[in-house]
Image (cartoon, helix red, strand yellow):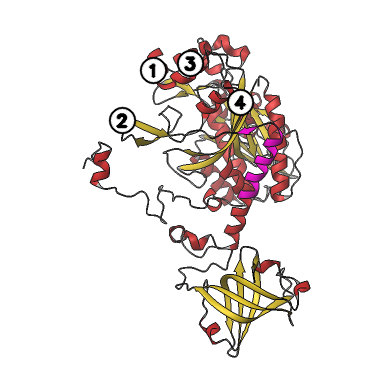
Amino acid sequence: MAREACGTLRIGDEGRMVTLAGWVHRVRDLGGITFVDLRDGSGLVQLVFRDIPEAHDLSLEDVIRIRGTVRRRESPNPKLPTGEIEVVVEELEMLSKSKPLPFPVDTDEPRASEETRLRYRFLDLRRERMQRNLHMRHKVSLAIRNYLSTQGFVEVETPYLTRSTPEGARDFLVPSRLEPGKFYALPQSPQLFKQTLVISGVERYFQIVRCFRDEDLRADRQPEFTQLDLEMAFLEDPDELFTVIEGLVVHVFREAIGVELEAPFPRISYAEAMLRYGSDKPDLRFGMEIVDVTELFRGCGFRVFAEAVERGEVVRALPVPGAAVKSRSELKRLEERAVELGLGGVAWAKFTLEGVSSPIAKFTSEELLRRAAEKAGAGERDLLLLAAGPAGTVAEALGTLRVELARELGLVPKGAWALCWIVDFPLFKLDDEEGRIISEHHPFTSPHPDDIPLLETDPLKVRARSYDLVINGVEIASGSIRIHRRDLQERIFKLLGLTEEEAREKFGFLLRALEYGAPPHGGIAFGLDRMVMMLAGESSIREVIAFPKTATGACPLTGAPAEVTEEQLRELHLRLES
């Protein structure tokens, strides 16, 4: 008799003889009778053993096969899909005995350290929660492939062994045995290959691809990660790509978690996002928008703010709803947190029916504070946080406080999804350590046509034709319109400090391709791990990757990275220095 799935049995199967196989999930030995919950990929079913001595020796995670008859349960379990029936076992076969477990796998909550979980990942992945995450990842990948296929995209694989190119992070290098002293690099992204593909006539390319970056890790970063990569030929207006991507995201949310999103998504310029939210990845699930009140405090009696305005700095206000009940100690902690975030000039004002309470009230008028509150949309019983300093410092600090306070005060609605596009990023930024400009996105990003005359005269004012997709305050995808003319690409390389020889050495094959009829093109890359993490309700991408690394880049399961033999090193013409 063929094996059947445990979780598919129902009351309609009553009286049938079935063969089941799976893991022992729970055991309840009552002496003359033993109850076992048997688990396979489809779910759980209760087994009943009578007069089978071997059943008394069953332990958790043993793998068994049984034959038995389905019958109606005397006490149904409404929490299980199979809760109306049970299987009375007639034959038991032990397929594999399990050692005592280092941690339980019958709970959604991990009861072990991350190191232990990853060392015994084959056990950790048996937990229902982890199985759900793997299934979620599969559903998302399947939805992506199905949707993009209907939109005329072709999935093309690109090489893992390529050459090292400067893309912002350190490369993982692979020594060549056949060409001693030369190295491959694992790709940080398929950027150059996907541009080459559209030049090759693949007008709509995509790939769910592994990428590699040798950089410091954190909860949402791994040395190897997966992204959805896509590129479109003849793309000159980002709106065309936005329409495709919005359709994709709507489809993925519908298929993966049954949520209907509204498109089109809002579009916010980088400058506006930094002003209103203090972040280029704003969380739009709640209000608390930052407001510029610089002119209100010009020449005011509070010297810290007045002098900041005279220096050309800014004064901005963050309204905090319903926070007037905060104690002095809480307000003191808020001030200390603001200082930690780099704010030297910071103050607060509370508004009540009785008046305004503020440490700077004696230096300025109540009317001025109320005007600032009115501009910021703060009302009675609200708190207004005021900060002065350089625009970038104030934006970043208030943006961080905005998110922290919203979470602390319970202002982030559960189950809400807020998506937006961030556009018009700067093309370059200043590297303070090296004292030169570097790419904000990557060196293949097209400058805004209106700003091309500023490239040599005022490069930091040049806008990029780049864009990010943000979901609930998390950057989920990033892309741009690419440069498709060799002369403009070489001009950008020169501005970034690359000589003609260096540009040819590092990017010669792309420059060569741009001379042979390159269409306008652009694309985007999604962090697939990050997207699945959010859809699964997890806080770390390690929870949605089957075999992740630790925060130090180690794999406790396999023991990687590990030493290699002297013979292997000699074959590669390498030696280790002590």
Residue 235, percent from left and from top:
65, 21
The crowd level at tag 2 (other Cα within 10 Å; few <14, some 14-19, many 20+) is few
Q: Which of 438 and 372 is in front in this view?
A: 438
Q: Residue 448, image x and y in percent?
A: 61, 17
Of circles 3 and 1, which is in front?
A: 3
Which residue has dot 2 on it? 179
The magenta-colored residue range is: 138-155
Element at badge 2?
A: loop
Which element is circle 4 on? Answer: loop
Query: In the picture provided, is 241 more to the left or to the right than 55?
Result: right
**The residue under label 3 is which amino acid type?**
Arg
Label tally: 4
Which amino acid type corresponds to the residue marked 1 in the rendered image?
Glu
Q: Name the residue under label 1.
A: 502
Q: Which residue position holds label 4?
A: 202
Q: Which residue is drawn at 74% across and 72% down?
A: 78
Q: Name the residue under label 3.
A: 512
Q: Overall secondary structure of the magenta stretch?
A: helix
Q: Quick one: SS at disc 1?
A: helix
First in sequence: mark 3 or mark 4? 4
Task: Return the disc, 3 or 1, that comes first in the chain's sequence.
Answer: 1
Instruction: Report the amino acid beneath label 2.
Output: Glu
3D distance between C-alphas at marks 3 and 4: 18 Å
